[in-house]
Amino acid sequence: MALIDENASLEEVQAVFKNDHFATDACGCRVVEAARGHAVTEFDITPGHRNEKGGVMGGAIFTVADLAFAVASNVGESVTVSVSSNIEFMSAAKGEKLIATADVDKNGRTLAFYTCYVTDELGTPVARATQTCMHLQR
């Protein structure tokens, strides 16, 4: 992945992450905010995101959170990769869109720690993910 300047426009960041084909093509995720240590991604819930019970599939929820984390941890940083992720599902989505907001908790020399909250557009808390990443070069 190319380095993303912290002054990159939203369109430039979107162009880079358009290459995250699972999130963007298969899941329909969009990057709506991008800054060093912060990102917001979202997708419109479709029948293809639903499990057999009618709820949004856990993998789809994780995907929107993982993309927000990837954007937040790579803008303005050296190439950064995920080391670990943990997700807690809090409640079922009530709305028609999922929104993931990732923010850095601590950015160290080698490792960084993030929390990502996933809600629907009604504000329903759907999930919380905690993620750790490693900066490959500093």
Image: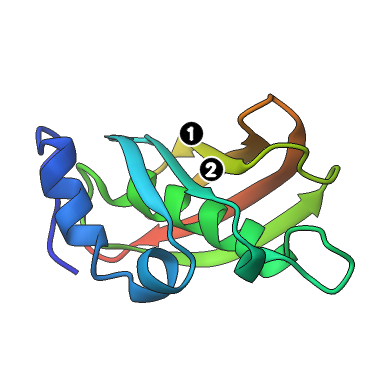
Numbered disc 1: secondary structure: strand
- Using a 10 Å C-alpha cutoff, classify the residue at mark 2 as few (fewer than 14 neighbours), some (14 to 19) or many (20 or more): many
Q: Residue furthest right?
A: 53
Which dot marks residue 103?
A: 1
Residue drawn at (58%, 53%) of the image: 131
Image-based side of 64 in relation to 95, left or right: left
Residue drawn at (72%, 65%) of the image: 50
Query: Considering the image in quadrants, where does the N terminus appear?
Result: bottom left
Name the quadrant containing residue 87. bottom right
- In the image, residue 87 sits, relative to residue 91, either above or below, namely below
Q: Nearer the viewer, residue 102 or 45?
A: 45
Residue drawn at (80%, 51%) of the image: 88
Image-based side of 51 in relation to 34, left or right: right
Dot 2 or dot 1, earlier in sequence: 1
Q: Are marks 2 and 1 in contact (CB under 8 Å)?
A: yes
Q: Amino acid at mark 1?
A: Asp
Numbered disc 2: secondary structure: strand
Q: Nearer the viewer, residue 56 or 100?
A: 56
Image-based side of 90 in relation to 86, left or right: right
Query: Residue 22: x percent and y percent?
Result: 42, 75
Q: Which residue is mark 2?
A: 114
- Gap in Å between the C-alphas at discs 2 and 1? 6 Å
Q: Nearer the viewer, residue 3 or 126?
A: 126
Tell me how many marks there are: 2
Q: Is residue 80 visible?
A: yes
Query: Residue 23: x percent and y percent?
Result: 43, 66
Q: Amino acid at mark 2?
A: Tyr
- In the image, residue 4 sits, relative to residue 37, either above or below, namely below
Q: Residue furthest front?
A: 47
